Image: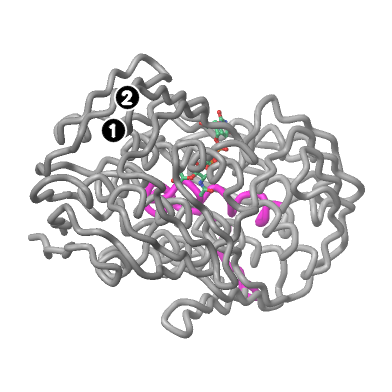
């Protein structure tokens, strides 16, 4: 397994290009299953999760051709010949559940392995299933698989109110509803930019959708969808991650392609902490106003609130803030696994249930640390950029799921960082 070695202390200056959003691409790719005409995605990120989704779609008989080094994905599910998503692929990536709604809507049946949990929580899929049942789906859970059937004549429009916001369940239901007969209303739907991006792509394919970006989605089913070409929206989590880098090290970083509307709540919190975010013609320019950031309190919420996927990165920054900060994680039940690793670097963090209290120290010290999940791993790298001495982050395969070429992007701005090939 590879490791990443960082010598802390270098100021960062320069520009970092932001890629297309992993979490948008992972729902846009299954959308190809809704039509027998080609769907082409541009601005796709080059990540291991995208390779896993490619493998899954190909196992179903879809064609996925990577072009321009993976930035363009030309897909076609004209020859769909398998409706079973196997556990050995699904267990690698929970987003695999997103093939369920599209397959069920298009062909009336699907068998999809239940995704395992993961490091940050149990992550059940009960809301995905309930939303599909509201469209008439008959679901039978056995042997670790969901056996799904649509009623004779196919899915039919229905109304479903999510008891709490679920990004993936909203995506599954939205895709299924595009081909359901009649009108579907999804209430308390997720408002994330990735949902907006999916709705815009589906509309290009001929879907009739209203309300994306609000809590209520209204979908008028159509008989079939046609092909389209769609650019994947900018990755707001990669953007937020690199916006934080200069706050650790000093200097100025311009995040190319960054859009303030994708990270408004996050940028407000940065401003409160004493970090400047300036919109430029090419993206977002970020620098800190003083040598130490100010302590701030953070509560993670569904969009448009502070994103849970940036909580670990923010905690890492607050470890050396001037004062005490409290972070409340309201989305996942176990998303503070970066805390023990940051404590190994000298951070002062007390975790109680969904709350973490961080008392700022002057500086962290480099140490060998271990990545536990995608966002935790990048929070350790950010902390290492400013820590005294050397940090070795092991198990960086977590990192490669969601960040392309981290070491190249950071070393181009002056970071002393390199990847060491593992055994
Ligand atoms: C998506 O996961 C993202 N993944 C996550 O990003 C992100 O953290 C999350 O949304 C929240 O924004 C992708 O888009 C591929 P949820 P998802 O359904 O859809 C519970 C990353 O780092 N829940 O909004 O799985 C669930 O356990 C990843 O890129 C149910 O109880 O998240 C969680 O506590 C991590 N039943 C909460 O709801 C369900 O049926 C929110 O989950 C579904 C979810």
Tell me, yes or no, whether the highlighted magenta stretch contains residue 232.
no
Residue 317, percent across and down? 33, 40
Whether residue 1 appears in this view of the structure is: no
In the picture, the quarter occupied by the N terminus is bottom left
Which residue in the structure is indicated by mark 2? 358
Q: Which residues are magenta?
A: 77-104
Task: Give me the residue at 52% from left, 61% from top.
Answer: 284
Relative to 172, 377 lies left or right: left
Instruction: Decide: few, some or many residues near mark 1? Use Cα within 10 Å; few <14, some 14-19, many ≥20.
Output: many
In the picture, the quarter occupied by the C terminus is bottom left
Which residue in the structure is indicated by mark 1? 319
Depicted 269 relative to depicted 40: above or below = above
Asked where in the image residue 161 lies, by quadrant, the reply is: top right
Task: Give me the residue at 71% from left, 58% from top.
Answer: 107
Q: Secondary structure at mark 1?
A: loop
Verify CB contact (< 8 Å) between mark 1 and mark 2: yes
Depicted 297 relative to depicted 385: above or below = above
Tell me, yes or no, whether the highlighted magenta stretch contains residue 89.
yes
């Amino acid at each position: 397994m590879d490791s990443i070695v960082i010598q802390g202390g270098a100021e960062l200056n320069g520009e970092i290009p932001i890629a297309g959003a992993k979490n948008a691409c992972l729902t846009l790719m299954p959308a190809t299953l809704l039509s027998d005409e080609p769907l082409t995605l541009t601005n796709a990120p080059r990540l291991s999760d995208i390779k896993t989704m490619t493998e899954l779609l190909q196992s179903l008989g879809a064609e996925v051709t990577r072009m321009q080094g993976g930035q363009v994905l030309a897909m076609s599910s004209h020859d769909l010949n398998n409706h079973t998503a196997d556990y050995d692929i699904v267990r690698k990536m929970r987003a695999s559940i997103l093939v369920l709604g599209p397959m069920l809507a298009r062909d009336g049946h699907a068998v999809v392995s239940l995704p395992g949990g993961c490091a940050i929580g149990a992550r059940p899929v009960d809301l995905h299933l309930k939303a599909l049942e509201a469209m008439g789906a008959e679901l039978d859970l056995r042997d670790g698989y969901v056996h799904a059937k649509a009623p004779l004549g196919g899915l039919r429009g229905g109304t479903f109110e999510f008891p709490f916001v679920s990004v993936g369940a909203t995506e599954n239901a939205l895709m299924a509803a595009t081909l359901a007969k009649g009108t579907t209303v999804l209430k308390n739907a997720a408002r994330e930019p990735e949902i907006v991006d999916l709705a815009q792509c589906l509309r290009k394919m001929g879907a009739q959708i209203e309300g994306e970006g609000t809590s209520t989605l209204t979908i008028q089913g159509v008989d079939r969808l046609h092909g389209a070409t769609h650019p994947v929206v900018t990755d707001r989590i990669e953007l937020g991650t690199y916006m934080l880098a200069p706050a650790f090290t000093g200097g100025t970083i311009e995040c190319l392609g960054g859009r303030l509307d994708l990270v408004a709540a996050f940028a407000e919190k940065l401003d409160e902490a004493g970090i400047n975010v300036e919109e430029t013609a090419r993206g977002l320019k970020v620098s800190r106003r003083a040598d130490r950031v100010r302590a701030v309190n953070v509560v993670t919420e569904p969009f448009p609130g502070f994103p849970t996927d940036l909580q670990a990165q923010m905690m890492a920054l607050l470890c050396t803030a001037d004062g005490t900060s409290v972070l409340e994680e309201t989305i996942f039940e176990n998303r503070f696994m970066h805390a023990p690793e940051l404590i190994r670097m000298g951070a002062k963090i007390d975790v109680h249930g969904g709350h973490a209290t961080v008392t700022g120290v002057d500086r962290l010290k480099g140490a060998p640390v271990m990545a536990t999940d995608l966002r935790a791993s990048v929070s350790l790298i950010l902390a290492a950029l400013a820590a005294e001495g050397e940090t070795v982050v092991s198990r960086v395969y977590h990192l490669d799921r969601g960040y392309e070429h981290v070491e190249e992007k950071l070393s181009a701005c002056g970071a002393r960082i390199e990847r060491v090939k593992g055994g």
